[in-house]
Image (spheres, rainbow, N blue to C red):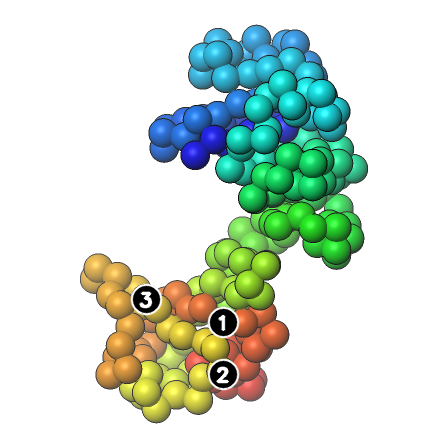
Amino acid sequence: MYIIIVGGGKIGYHLAKALLAEGHELLVIEKDRNRIEFISGELGSVCMLGDGCETAVLAEAGTNRADMLIAVTGDDEDNLVACQLAKHKFKVPRTIARLSNPKNETLFHLLGIDVTVSSTDVIMENIEQEVPTHVLTHLLTIRDRGIEIVEVKIPPDAKSTGKKVKDLDLPPGSALAIVIRSDQRPQMVTQDTVIQAGDQIIALTPTDTEEQLKIALQGDNK
């Protein structure tokens, strides 16, 4: 897969490093020569000097053959412009934009950006995972499909404890996929899986029925 990253800051660098390790073809577009020298010294010749918001730069980068463009500069407007150019001028199938201000999320999706990642949201998710009373954690949002992948923790007094999956009142479109238990390997959930206290369940659910899923597994007092 050919992936273009606009922005060679810390996020862009670590993302490039991870994607290269997975065997992807990669190009980082960055305006700062010092960052280019640093990344090139660490990762090799994977950088291009230029502004990822400029059509000529994207054309030179071969954006017309890119499978994905990820814009992770510190400026929401730059990320939006880069993704819009990639999507509408170069017909890139998938665009991902970093957001510094979560309030811009709705605008980005209205303008056709496939996926947005808010730095604020990521921090909040990590905080929520450390809070014992927080029983539902977002793992991934597939926004163009309206699907959430979430982790649900089952406390001892959950209404689902002791019940088989087939007996649960799950909302339409939701599915329990994997159950993780202490000292056991993760297992695929079946209709006959019995929910136990302490289970960590990976589930898929439509975004608008997430609360119903939580109630089905936890009760309405959670």
Secondary structure of residue under mark 2: loop
Secondary structure of residue under mark 1: strand
Picture quadrant of residue 49: top right
Q: Is residue 105 visible?
A: no
Q: Nearer the viewer, mark 3 or mark 2?
A: 2
Position in image of residue 148 (x %, y %) = 52, 64
| Residue 126 in the figure: left or right of residue 159 | right
User: Mark 1 and mark 3: span between their CA atoms?
Assistant: 13 Å
Examine the rendered structure and indicate whether residue 120 appears above or below residue 10.
below
Contact flag, marks 1 and 3 (Cβ < 8 Å): no
Return the residue nearer the eye: 197 or 151.
Answer: 151
Which numbered marker is on residue 178?
3
Contact flag, marks 1 and 2 (Cβ < 8 Å): yes
Q: Name the residue type under label 2.
A: Pro
Q: Is the C terminus in the top left, top right, bottom left or bottom right quadrant?
A: bottom right
Q: Name the residue type under label 3.
A: Ile
| Residue 196 in the figure: left or right of residue 28 | left
* Residue drawn 26% across the image and 68% down it: 188
* Residue drawn 58% across the image and 65% down it: 146
Which numbered marker is on residue 171?
2
Which of marks 2 and 3 precedes in the sequence? 2
Contact flag, marks 3 and 2 (Cβ < 8 Å): no
Secondary structure of residue under mark 3: strand
* Residue drawn 68% across the image and 31% down it: 73
> Neighbour class for label 2 at 10 Å: few (<14), some, many (≥20)?
some
> Neighbour class for label 3 at 10 Å: few (<14), some, many (≥20)?
some
Which numbered marker is on residue 205?
1
